[in-house]
Amino acid sequence: MNDSKIKAPRGTFDVLGEQASARTALEARARAILEGAGYERIETPTFEATELFARGVGESTDIVRKEMFTFEDGAGRSLTLRPEGTAPVCRAYVEHGMHKRRQPVKLWYLSSFFRHERAQAGRYRQFWQVGAEALGSDDPAVDAESITLLATLLGEMGVRDLRLRLSSLGGPESRGEYRERLQVHLRAHEQSLSEDVRDRIELNPLRAFDSDHPGTRTVMESAPRLLEHLSDEDAAHFEEVRRLLDATGVPHEVDSTLVRGLDYYTRTVFEFTSDALGAQSGVGGGGRYDRLVERLGGPATPGIGWAAGIERILLAGDGSETEGAATKGGGQPVTAGLVELFVALEDQGPDARAAAFALVTEARSAGLTAQMDLGGRSLKGQLGHANALGARFVAIVGETETVLRDMQTRVQQPLATDSVVHAVLRGQHDL
Ligand code: AMP
């Protein structure tokens, strides 16, 4: 009999002791932040039809070309351990007819993912991600909210030396034209490119920006940039995302070389990195994927989301949240469905929107569960939404002042927008 010791497979690990507590604390923080902003937890199967990732993530990506754990079931169907979470969430959105719900539908997950990568510190073959997806709205405020929530989570986990890079890949039209321009540039310098990049000039030329091959990097320095060739609509969308991030004080750098590895991105893309991590510096990232649901056989549905690696958040974190969690009990659980403040807009003018967005973010930082309507609805529609959510207070942000309505007592008072959070906290206290 062979009785030699059996070890865990390469690139996998056991979660023990302090590590397990740290994960519990992170999960509690993520739940409080995301459910407080109206995200619902979703669990999807550990394996899916291979076709989902081939179509969803894209045949030209590293993930589909070489990193998937794929196997056949007894009946000869090809299945794959999920390498990422967005395609499965979109599949579930279509399968459960979620387009019939109030849009955007906001979902979050914390699950394990599988990629056959070269294992090293911070890079594993089974790893965990926390992720959030908002489907059904192309409003730039959804982009800004999504990014702000990840910034909040990473901030609260004490992730050190954090940077946020942001770009826009435009819509399919400007992207198509740009692709051709980039291909011309790459073909003109084919001799200097790495073999991998050369092989993908036709299939996925944008990936050349991610190469660390010195010759390729030199060629890419003079390559045309997509950000400079956006359509007016895409450029305006990007500007609005940036304006809203500025309104909430989320620092970011525009980086026209950011393309991200997945095929499905359109318009906004972003990535958080931590210099505390060394070579594998990506902590989390995401972007908009306005064509993905359609590509998976669903109705045309815009979407945006992100995923962040649990192991990397904990590696780059300063541990403060974990210590705190021991005394605080791991973050405040959010009562399902409880919305303390709903922010509505009297009109959809850009300044009022930025003020409303800043107010929601301020309320969340103060520990309130707060939401705003991200569907561009009329005031009546927004108040209907607030009612459906059972909001305790509604702030109606206008040009010059904000009206705060207590939905229980029906008392209304005009206020300066910057004193709304204080009034809500006081109002709750008085109950
Ligand atoms: P991606 O889905 O590739 O955009 O990755 C999002 C985040 O997941 C990254 O920023 C990492 O934090 C984490 N991640 C991705 N791949 C791995 C891996 N192989 N091992 C550990 N973490 C990973």
Image: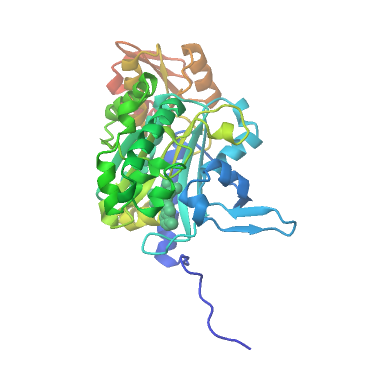
Answer with the quarter of the image where residue 189 lies. top left
Q: How many marks?
A: 0
Task: Mark yes or no: residue 250 visible.
Answer: yes
Q: Quadrant of residue 245?
A: top left
Seen in the image, is 394 located left or right of residue 301?
Answer: left
The front one of 428 and 317 is 317
The answer to which of 423 and 76 lies nearer the viewer is 76
User: Which residue is pictured at 28% across the width and 17% down the height?
Assistant: 416
- Nearest to the observer: residue 248 or residue 73: 73
Quadrant of the rendering where the N terminus is positioned = bottom right
* Rendering coords of residue 408 (x, y %): 48, 21
Say whether residue 158 is visible.
no
Is 136 above or below relative to 133?
above
User: Residue placed at 42% from the left, 18% from the top?
Assistant: 344
Q: Is residue 91 above or below residue 15?
A: above
In the rendered image, the residue lying farthest to the right is 75
| Displayed quadrant of residue 354 | top left
Q: Position of residue 131 (x, y in %)?
A: 46, 44
Q: Is residue 8 left or right of residue 268?
A: right
Give residue 364's position: percent from left, percent from top.
Answer: 37, 34
Task: Indicate the quadrant containing the C terminus: top left, top right, bottom left or bottom right.
Answer: top left
Q: Position of residue 56 (x, y in %)?
A: 55, 41
Find the residue positioned furthest to the bottom. Answer: 1
What is the image's colouring? rainbow
